[in-house]
Image (cartoon, rainbow, N blue to C red):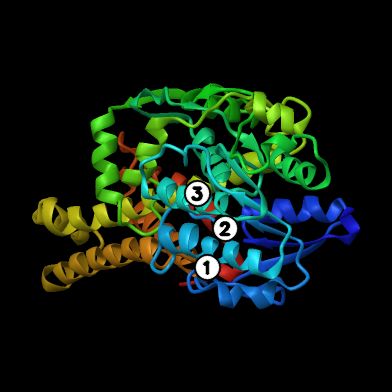
Amino acid sequence: MNGGEMNILVCGARGFIGAALCDALTRDGYRVFKGVRNGKDVAIDYATDTDPAVWVPRLRDIDVVINAVGILVERRDQTFDLLHRRAPIALFEASCQAGVKHIVQISALGAETGTTSYFQSKRAADDHLQTLPVRHHILRPALVYGTAGASARFFRALASAPIHPLPAGGHQLLRPIHVDDLADIVVDLLRSERVPEADGQPLDLVGGTQVAYRDMLAAYRQSLGFPAAWRVAIPAPLIALGATLLDRVPGSVLTRDTWRMLNQGNTAEVATTAKVLGHLPAGVDDFIRPQDAPALRHEALSTWRGPLLRGALAVTWIGTAICSAFIHPQAASLDLLARVHLHGAPALAMLYLASALDLVLGMATLLRPGRRLWAAQAALIAGYSILIAIALPEFLWHPFGPILKNVPILALLFVLLSEERGNKETS
């Protein structure tokens, strides 16, 4: 059966790996049906579709099923047990009932021996598929790199920082595989019999270069056009403590499981991958193409630059509020206000009102950032600076530069104002 005669259902088609598979299969002439949670394609929901009977009607006229659904961190109803075990097993069972000829399971390198819930759930689905009377391939890729991948964006952002905090020194061994190589392998397995003996046996798929975690970040940083970063080793007990504290924080990349997975490493021999692919897969030095580097460099910087600037600004406002209201001698503050003709109760009221305003602006910077807020802060700082320059001109040439230091803060606000997208207006 050639590509044009084959109907393929890709579950998880909107995910990073699933989308790459859909593109590669479509280019090769296959008829691709996209399994997604919401949309006009084949409606699926791994959080609820755990009964084979639900799947059978969707699999009519489907020749190949590809399961590319996966999560790294659990969220509410998206659990490892549901998305990695129960729903895939129901899908595999229904595929047998519906006469599907071939199943491709995208598992994960380390699932065979891994002890985390992530690996155990992947292994459970893999093991079940191996008991079924249907042709299948179980692919266990290492960490997958791709421009659109969430993990790749995360690591590029880390690499772009001038300081690399390295868990336990960053010596953990990895062998990332490029998503294009993974997609090519899937296409090759469907259209040829290059490695027929691999049918049914899990295939560990890796990239062309084995690197330590620290060297992977360095390679990405060099490809993005940055000079070498400073490296700071973070003791393993401190990382373990952070993983424990963040284990149930929604969206946290650092959890006890991800820390254990990093410690176990993510590598295997490249021979199997090269045999199935027909050539040596790409290595980390080739992942970021020179023509893509400028855009990826900007994206990487923007990932942490905005939060860093907002955090610094919030600390400045909140710190100023606390110092003005509770730490700096009140008499000294009232003496300064007297220079602008405020005395007694009005001066005291102004002191605490100004402190309260600073606190509100600091909290708003953390919770309700937006263009109006940046413009209001810039106007307030400019107004403060002009008033002080007129009433207290000695602060213009004060050795600590209390007025001149407002210039970089105004520049910071100008950057935030310029980079804030219109549809993100929240203030």
Residue occupying image coordinates x 18% and y 61%: 338
* Res 180 → quadrant: top right
Q: Point out residue 188 in the picture as x, y percentages from the top left corner.
A: 79, 42
Compare marks 3 and 2 and give the one earlier in the sequence.
Answer: 2
At a point 40% along the width and 39% down the height, the residue shown is 114
Q: Which residue is mark 1?
A: 46
Q: Is residue 342 visible to us here?
A: no
| Circles 1 and 2 in contact, beta carbons < 8 Å | yes
User: Who comes first in sequence, dot 3 or dot 1?
Assistant: 1
> In the image, which disc is placed on residue 25?
none
Q: Nearer the viewer, residue 230 or 261?
A: 261
Q: Residue extending furthest front?
A: 133
Identify the mark at residue 69; answer none if there is no mark: 2
Mark 3 burial class by Cα count in 10 Å: few <14, some 14-19, many 20+: some
- How far apart are the alpha carbons under marks 1 and 2? 8 Å
Q: Is residue 65 left or right of residue 424?
A: right
Q: Residue at x 49, y 32 (%)?
A: 266
Q: Earlier in the sequence, mark 1 or mark 2?
A: 1
Residue type highlighted by circle 2: Val
| Mark whose residue sits in front, 3 or 1 | 3
Closer-to-camera residue (426/152): 152
The percent position of residue 378, horizontal first and vertical second, equals 46, 60
Query: How far across and down, in percent of the image, does residue 24 sit?
Result: 79, 50
* Residue 98 visible, this orientation: yes
- Residue type at mark 1 is Tyr
The answer to whether residue 144 is left or right of residue 180 is: left
Please determine whether, in this image, residue 292 is positioned above or below residue 268: below
Residue holding disc 3? 127
> Are the residues flagged by discs 3 and 2 in contact, CB closer than 8 Å?
no
Q: Is residue 400 left or right of residue 2?
A: left
